[in-house]
Image: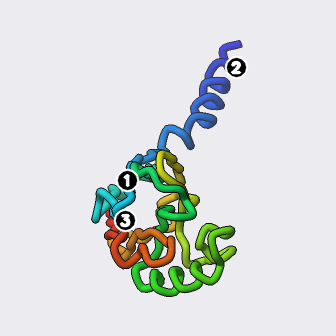
Amino acid sequence: MRKLIPTLLLLCLAAMAPSAFAKTCAVTINGDDAMKFDKTEIKIESSCTQVAVTLKHTGKLAANVMGHDWVLAKTADMAGIDADGMKAGMAAGFIKADDARVIAHTKVIGGGQSDTVTFATSKLTKGGDYSFFCSFPGHSSIMKGKFVFG
């Protein structure tokens, strides 16, 4: 019995270890009918192992009229993702299928809706050049910002 207790304790600690070191950092960003995000920069500490971004559409217009999503990518990839997304169309959420350049994205939402995307920071490089934007056609020229990890 004496040998069993330390073994059980070690097994319990080992089972808890992954969650003990995981740190999810949550961010909420709002988009409106005036085609604006309420943030132009999002900063995430390097101690975060996951990021949960919630996009809220604070407007009233439907997704097919004034839909918004939140897309994260390297800044250099943004224009290409946006162009390919327009070709992909609304049915694809304005994101080309299996686009490896996209780090994370929400679905396209309309007024009063919200969506959350969670992703691992292992996909990011500390100090890397990242941007977030809305991929709805024409929106990325205004609805964009800097994503800072580090």
SS at badge 3: loop
Image location (x, y in percent) of residue 59: 41, 51
| 130 up-or-down from 5: above or below | below
Which quadrant would the N terminus be assigned to in this image?
top right
- Depth check, front residue: 53 or 61: 61
How far is disc 3 from disc 2 in space, using C-alphas? 62 Å
In the picture, the disc for residue 29 is 1
Q: Report the side of 14 relative to 34 (left or right).
A: right
**Left or right: 84, with 29 as reference point:** right
Q: Is residue 113 above or below residue 139?
A: above
Q: In this rendering, which labeled residue sits more in front, label 2 or label 1?
A: 1
User: Quick check: 21 above or below 98?
Assistant: above
Q: Residue at x 70, y 20 (%)?
A: 4
Name the amino acid type tagged 3. Met
Q: Residue 114: x percent and y percent?
A: 50, 48
Q: Which mark is residue 35?
A: 3
CA gap, disc 2 and disc 1? 50 Å
Q: Residues within 10 Å of mark 1 (few under 14, many from 20)?
A: some
Horizontal arrangement in the rendering, residue 24 relative to residue 149 (left or right): right
Please tell me which of labels 3 and 2 falls first in the chain: 2
Return the x and y of residue 51 as percentages of the image width and height: 46, 53
